[in-house]
Image (cartoon, rainbow, N blue to C red):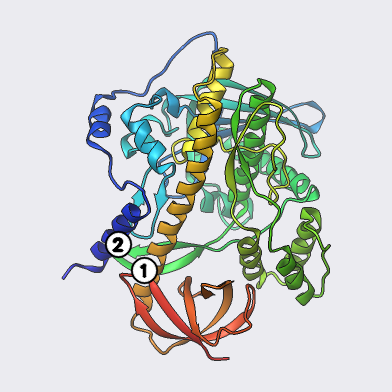
Amino acid sequence: MEDRTSQLKNIARRLMREHGLEPDLSTAALEQLRTIGAAPLARGPGIRDLRHLPWCSIDNDDSRDLDQLSVAQPQGGGGVKILVAIADVDAVVQVSAPLDEHARTNTTSVYTAAEVFPMLPERLSTDLSSLAEDQERLSLVVDMSVTAAGAVDASVVYRAVVVNRAKLAYDAVAAWLEGRGPPPARAASVSGMDQQLRIQDGVAQALKRVRREQGALGLTILEARAIYHGSALTDLRPDEDNRAKELIEYFMIAANTAVAQFLERHRYASLRRVLRAPERWGRIVELARACGASLPATPDARALSDFLAGRERAAPERFPDLSLSIVKLLGSAEYVRKRPGEAVQGHFGLAVDDYTHATAPNRRFPDLVTQRLVKAALAGRPSPYGEEELRELAAHCTEQEGNAAKVERQVHKSAAAMLLESRTGAQFDAMVTGASDKGVWVRILHPLAEGRLVRGFEALDVGDPVRVQLVRTDVERGHIDFVRVR
């Protein structure tokens, strides 16, 4: 009989195939990988030398696929120049090569509770095309001037050689920024890095204030992280937001916006990331009414943002539940092709009109496509992608992103079923996370898991609290069944 870890990995690989995702590289891609030597380091008049700057990366403790670095340069009048360096993955992965075809098929790295399926092989994504610590790397730099009030009033994009001086982790940086811990050891060992982080944090908080004023939605989403002791899965715990994650989040939003505007200025067709106004706005209005608040009858991001900010202050312990309900009702973002001068939908959740994905080319194919478009614009070359190809890519990337999310959710459910299979009959406080003709789903917190309500689901809707009892689990199928207690 296979051990539980192997069972979970086999489930993950099966689900990848069932959803049109390749768990392994093709023979041709493996052969190409063997031919790649050192990381390329081009030099030329269009490539700046920024190795002297105190660049740092902030990511998960165990992340090695480092896509971006940041550095702050104070300017006169209280403004700050923020530079975001993005790994030049295109320098390693050429268009239409076997490795590119694999990335184009999957379009994203898939992070499951059993195994990570990287979009690009680890020899690239965690080494040759990663902005690894103390290594010279080619990059695209998004150079933004931020006013003291937190507005980005100018931006340029160019190529540069950079060196990551400090590989830092979210939790350690956040603990220090929030006064709960000492400076991260690596930051303390690099002269001036502590001041760098303070400046970057201040700019990120100013960017956050502006985004919220413009209607960006402040949501707290509990995402599960699989906890292993040795090879044994022991828990699924919430991976909570913190100040360091906010720092990166708001820098990336600013950089993605700047890149979208750069491509529009240069008259290149591009991929945009959009989130349309929610179709289930009426249910969002009902949730607000249940909290004693009122929202307009038609979708209004600013009003929703103000409501969410008020609820976070009034009931922080319940805010993750409300956030999840809102996220489910907002629907999914998607990729669309944008022609120069064409009006397209913005991003409702971020309250921005110009938005693309550019900052994670090791992990997302749309970002690699965008990187190639930017490099073509900088060099004055024609676009490497035709308008019809971009339209097809947008649809394909949206579809595969959805498939990857299904795999991640299903493996998570199998992992949760594995943890819960000895607790049949136990009762839990839950919240309704999905309600449709297909059924009603609820979420519990310990472990963080979602299951189907098979009895007592009448008249329930997203956001309703409910007491449930576990009645059945099926690890192989990822089924967790509850009945309503009250």
84, above or below 250, in the image: above
Quadrant of the frame with the C terminus: bottom right
Question: Which of 479/199 is in front?
Answer: 479
Name the image quarter holding residue 192.
top right
Q: Residues under labels 2 and 1: Cα distance?
A: 8 Å
Residue 442 appearing in the image: no
Instruction: Give, as a three-letter code, the residue at label 1.
Output: Ser
- Seen at 69% across and 64% down, the residue is 280
Residue at image position (44%, 62%) is: 409
Residue depicted at 47% across the width and 40% down the height: 364
* Residue 423 drawn above or below residue 7: below
- Which residue type does callout 2 highlight? Ile
Q: Which class describes the residues within 10 Å of circle 2: few (<14), some (14-19), or many (20+)? A: many
Name the residue that disc number 1 marks.
414
Specify few, some or many for label 1: CA neighbours under 10 Å numbering under 14, 14-19, or 20 or more. many
Is disc 1 placed on a helix, strand or loop?
Answer: helix
Q: x, y percentage for residue 170? A: 53, 50
Q: Are marks 2 and 1 in contact (CB under 8 Å)?
A: yes
Relative to 115, is 60 on the left or the right? Answer: right
| Position of the N terminus by quadrant | bottom left
Residue 74 visible in this rendered orientation of the protein: yes
x and y percentages locating residue 188 in the rendered image: 53, 41
On the rendered structure, is 310 left or right of 360? right
Number of residue marks: 2
Would you name the residue on which mark 2 appears? Answer: 11
